[in-house]
């Protein structure tokens, strides 16, 4: 009997697969083809909510674990994934400068906010009030990670390229059966595709569409991640990722002219250089209104589990949430109440 069937091979599914393999568990991973948010994601990890100058929940713990996990992926897959770059938050007034220093003095934010403002002159960027520097930030090439880890799983005959058929899942108290194979547990990590899952679609998942641009701007010479009304992330070879939009109405993964114009208007308000659009991408993030992941076990079927709702901070959250769920299943450890699906007390489960 196989230990785990993992439905979904985005960041959440990959991180759980890796935890299971590191603990000598047998797995199969189904791609599922339900969503592509991990592939088109910005990939940023940032321990600070820069809009309000407040700390991200459990930021230090998440960063420490994620750093080791992504280093392990790099070594295992022989690729470069983790690019550590400071985030420069453009400041727009003396008041914002003061707010930055107040935030940097808070105990939970002090490790992540530099108390020195930077007045660097980037071509085409007017910044008379300077930049605040976020420490311990960067980005992960999520598209390369997903592609490479899927190839790794295929090489081990642990990968199934098909759409998961919920009706074919047979549930017994002691095992699960799917496609003529028996499993001890199943992990559902379908992202926004969770809405089609008959076992967990009662959960209050709310997809948020995001659109990104890849631009080519030879004269910018940016060596940090710049954050203003949009982020500008250097990819090398004069290419930059620009994002992102937030649309709570459109639940499709189709790039839109409206999204492109929003990005261009915001970009042109801070960047006064010629550039060309190389690519326009879109995806639906699996978000939750209380901004916490949804992790846990089905109350009626003890071998069905969910790992979802990582939202805009999937790069930071995925390693920690995968580890928490694995230990919950294998060692009956309690899940933090902030992420446990038990917090949704009004759910009626089938």
Image (cartoon, rainbow, N blue to C red):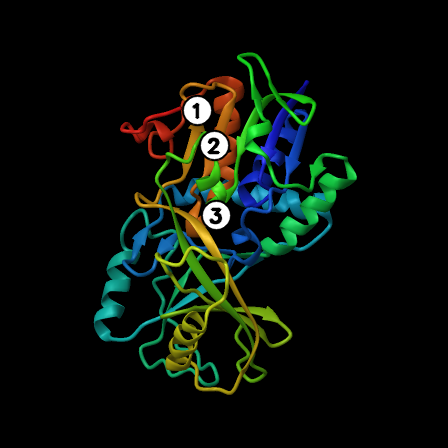
Secondary structure of the residue carrying numbered label 1: loop
Q: Nearer the viewer, residue 162 or 80?
A: 162
Q: Is residue 224 visible?
A: no
Image-based side of 169 in relation to 26, left or right? left
In the displayed structure, 208 sits above or below 90; it is above
Q: Residues within 10 Å of mark 2 (few under 14, many from 20)?
A: many
Image-based side of 240 in relation to 131, left or right? right
Residue at the front extreme of this rendering: 167
Alpha-carbon distance for marks 2 and 3? 15 Å
Q: Residues within 10 Å of mark 1 (few under 14, many from 20)?
A: some
Secondary structure of the residue carrying numbered label 3: helix
Q: Nearer the viewer, residue 218 or 63?
A: 218
Q: Where's residue 318, x and y in %?
A: 50, 42
| Quarter where residue 178 is shown | top right
Q: Which residue is mark 1?
A: 298
Q: Where's residue 142, x and y in %?
A: 58, 53
Alpha-carbon distance for marks 1 and 3? 22 Å
Residue ID at (42%, 55%):
251
Quadrant (top left/top right/bottom left/bottom right) for the N terminus: top right
In the displayed structure, 135 sits above or below 178; it is below
Image-based side of 347 in relation to 295, left or right? left
Residue at the top extreme of this rendering: 174
Q: Nearer the viewer, residue 92 or 157?
A: 157
Give whichever of discs 1 and 3 has the lower sequence position. Answer: 1
Task: Using the image, tell me which numbered label, if any, was put on residue 306.
Answer: 2
Q: Where's residue 217, x and y in %?
A: 56, 81
- CB atoms of marks 1 and 2 within 8 Å: yes
Secondary structure of the residue carrying numbered label 2: strand
Q: Which residue is mark 3?
A: 314
Q: Residues within 10 Å of mark 3 (few under 14, many from 20)?
A: many
């Amino acid at each position: 009997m196989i230990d785990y069937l993992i439905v979904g091979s985005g960041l959440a599914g990959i991180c759980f697969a890796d935890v299971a393999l590191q603990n000598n568990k047998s797995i199969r991973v189904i791609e599922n083809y339900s969503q592509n948010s991990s592939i088109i994601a910005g990939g940023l990890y940032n321990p600070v909510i820069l809009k309000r100058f407040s700390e991200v929940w459990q930021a230090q713990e998440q960063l420490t674990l994620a750093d080791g996990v992504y280093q392990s992926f790099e070594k295992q897959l022989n690729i470069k994934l983790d690019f550590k770059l400071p985030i420069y938050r453009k400041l727009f007034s003396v008041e914002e400068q003061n707010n930055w220093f107040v935030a940097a003095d808070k105990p939970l934010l002090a490790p992540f906010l530099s108390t020195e403002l930077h007045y660097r002159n980037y071509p085409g960027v007017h910044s008379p009030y300077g930049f605040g520097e976020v420490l311990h930030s960067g980005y992960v090439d999520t598209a390369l990670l997903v592609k490479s880890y899927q190839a790794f799983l295929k090489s081990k005959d642990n990968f199934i390229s098909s759409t998961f058929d919920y009706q074919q899942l047979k549930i017994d108290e002691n095992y699960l059966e799917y496609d003529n194979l028996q499993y001890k547990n199943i992990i559902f990590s379908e992202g926004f595709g969770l809405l089609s899952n008959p076992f967990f679609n009662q959960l209050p998942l709310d997809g948020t569409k995001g659109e990104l641009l890849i631009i080519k701007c030879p004269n910018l010479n940016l060596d940090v991640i710049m954050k203003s009304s949009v982020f500008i992330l250097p990819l090398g070879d004069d290419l930059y990722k620009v994002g992102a939009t937030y649309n709570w109405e459109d639940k499709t993964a189709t790039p839109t002219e409206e999204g492109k114009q929003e990005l261009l208007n915001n970009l042109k308000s801070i960047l006064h250089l010629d550039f060309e659009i190389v690519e326009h991408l879109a995806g639906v993030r699996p978000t939750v209104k209380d901004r916490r992941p949804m992790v846990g076990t089905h109350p009626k079927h003890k071998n069905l589990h969910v790992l979802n709702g990582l939202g805009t901070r999937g790069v930071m959250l995925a390693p920690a949430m995968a580890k928490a769920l694995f230990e919950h299943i294998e060692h009956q450890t309690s899940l933090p109440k902030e992420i446990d699906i038990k917090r949704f007390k009004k759910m009626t489960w089938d």
